[in-house]
DNA sequence: GATCATAGTCGTCTGCCTGACGATAAACAC
DNA sequence: GTGTTTATCGTCAGGCAGACGACTATGATC
């Protein structure tokens, strides 16, 4: 590794965010509308430049706060301070991914409970939650019948990678609780799995599995009927982060 | 995401490589000795600057070839052309990780079969395979009694992350075959798992498991006695990349 | 050449986990 | 009350993993 200063080309470094949540039983991602070229008017993932004195995770947490108002979860802090889970996803550095200059983007994945309304610098019309299938379908028509343009830059690929990471990670970790409010029921947690995986799960087996995994759920003592039906026990996320044995995703 | 050219600080972008192999029943990583400050004379992970017209994975493959002579496995190509498995690991961008300038390093993980001898620009004394525990122990004494200096920069953390990735990934993927030559026996594959995980596995249960997983192993018809004992069947890696159900790593 | 050490391969048994699904409980709507 | 919805407990069969016995086929040693 030689550091002759003339030997390396300068790069711009950004962080892009795949912010996922579950709304109305479907997996949604945050998208912001680009206000300037290139890809002006198209939807893109939120993100921005890493500052000179910032760590990558700091930059991601700052962007997350700016775009969504969410505080990032300090990984060293105890669970569930209502902050979002934030982790590095992957880095994208194709020379042509930005037409203007060489940009390397360190994508991060954020998982958040369902939130009121997005804000992008206070302008709600330029930020929204959209179902990931809608954002990923190339040039189809959205739910409202409007034609859908693909995401700007290589953001469709980044989003797809983030969704895949989330889908696989809730199998063997307790990360699905990051989509839930601080207190939640087994049924709400099951609906998270169903939305993220896009499958239906047996409520009885799911209940047995999650309540039988030590450290996954801690009962708070309270109950709720906010989902209708018989009152359900409320739980908080337990200390366990790795599930062993894992949740099994039904095939196909 | 605004692109005011005056708004972003310039970064240097490098790739660092965690190259792992299994030698003499222990997990080893490639280390190179630094020829210049900072950390002159200390061991470090191989790596170098990303060039202006290079993708990140291209840069990693180029560095891998330069430092080890290994060709990287094109992920789109069929398995086992004797190239190494190469994947992106994570990106490290702490503002202080390099004392001279702002460097963001995109670390990659490479898995290779046991190789003859390393070469770093043809100079063997400046590159070696070392057991990962030896490289990761901070300021202890190596097997030869010499004091061990920690790896340069944040490379100990990068190596630890790479080792952890490899340990977990061989659980649910067929990646352990990347440590094996094109043809190998069940026992050789088992010794890979034992070296990477640092545990002993039951040869009978292991044999049942790997030969019973569809697509994991394909018999070549040949046999070998290179390990002594009764001749063992030779296998190639099958097409399967994901193991379902996974290999189970014994707890502690 | 018999014996031993080493590896490989095939079976058996038991316990645990999962998927399928029946049954009951506790709320709300009418 | 009746029906609907959701939650929760139980049962049962099949599959897989861990523990481990038994046998096989080579090379090494005496």
Image (cartoon, coloured by chain):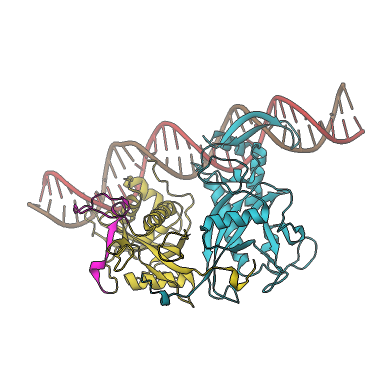
Chain colours: A yellow, B cyan, C brown, D red
Q: In which quarter of the image is the N terminus of chain B?
A: bottom left
Judge whether residue B128 can be spotted in this image. Answer: yes
Residue at image coords 38%, 56%: A159
Q: In which quarter of the image is the C terminus of chain B?
A: bottom right
Magenta stretch contains residue A19: no
Number of disc labels: 0
Q: Horizontal placement of A201 versus B29: left or right?
A: left
Image position, residue A22 (x, y; %): 31, 58
Q: Which quarter of the picture shows residue B133?
A: bottom right
> Which residue is more in the foreground, A9 or B19?
A9
The relative height of residue B183 versus residue B155 in the rendered view (above or below) is above
The relative height of residue D21 versus residue A169 in the rendered view (above or below) is above
The relative height of residue B221 versus residue B190 in the rendered view (above or below) is above
Residue bounds of the magenta highlight: A122-150
Magenta stretch contains residue A146: yes
Image position, residue A203 (x, y; %): 32, 47
Judge whether residue A116 can be spotted in this image. Answer: no
Residue at image coords 24%, 69%: A124
């Amino acid at each position: 590794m030689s550091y002759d200063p003339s030997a390396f080309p300068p790069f711009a470094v950004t962080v892009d965010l795949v912010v996922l949540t579950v709304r109305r039983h479907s997996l949604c991602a945050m998208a912001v509308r680009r206000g300037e070229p290139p890809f002006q008017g198209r939807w893109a993932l939120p993100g921005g430049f890493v500052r000179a004195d910032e760590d990558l995770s700091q930059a991601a947490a700052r962007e997350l706060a700016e775009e969504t108002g969410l505080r990032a979860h300090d990984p060293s802090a105890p669970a569930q301070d209502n902050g979002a889970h934030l982790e590095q996803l992957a880095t994208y550095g194709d020379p042509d991914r930005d037409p203007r200059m060489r940009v390397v983007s360190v994508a991060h994945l954020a998982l958040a409970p369902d939130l009121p309304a997005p804000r992008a610098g206070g302008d709600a019309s330029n930020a929204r939650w959209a179902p990931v299938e809608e954002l990923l379908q190339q040039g189809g028509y959205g739910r409202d019948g409007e034609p859908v343009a693909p995401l700007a830059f290589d953001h469709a690929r980044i989003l797809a990678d983030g969704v895949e990471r989330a889908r696989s990670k809730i199998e063997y970790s307790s990360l699905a609780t990051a989509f839930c409010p601080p207190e939640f029921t087994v049924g709400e947690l099951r609906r998270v799995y169903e939305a993220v995986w896009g499958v239906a799960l047996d409520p009885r087996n799911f209940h047995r599995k999650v309540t039988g995994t030590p450290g996954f759920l801690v009962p708070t003592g309270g109950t709720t009927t906010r989902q209708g039906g018989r009152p359900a026990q409320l739980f908080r996320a337990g200390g366990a982060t790795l599930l062993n044995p894992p949740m099994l995703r039904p095939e196909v």
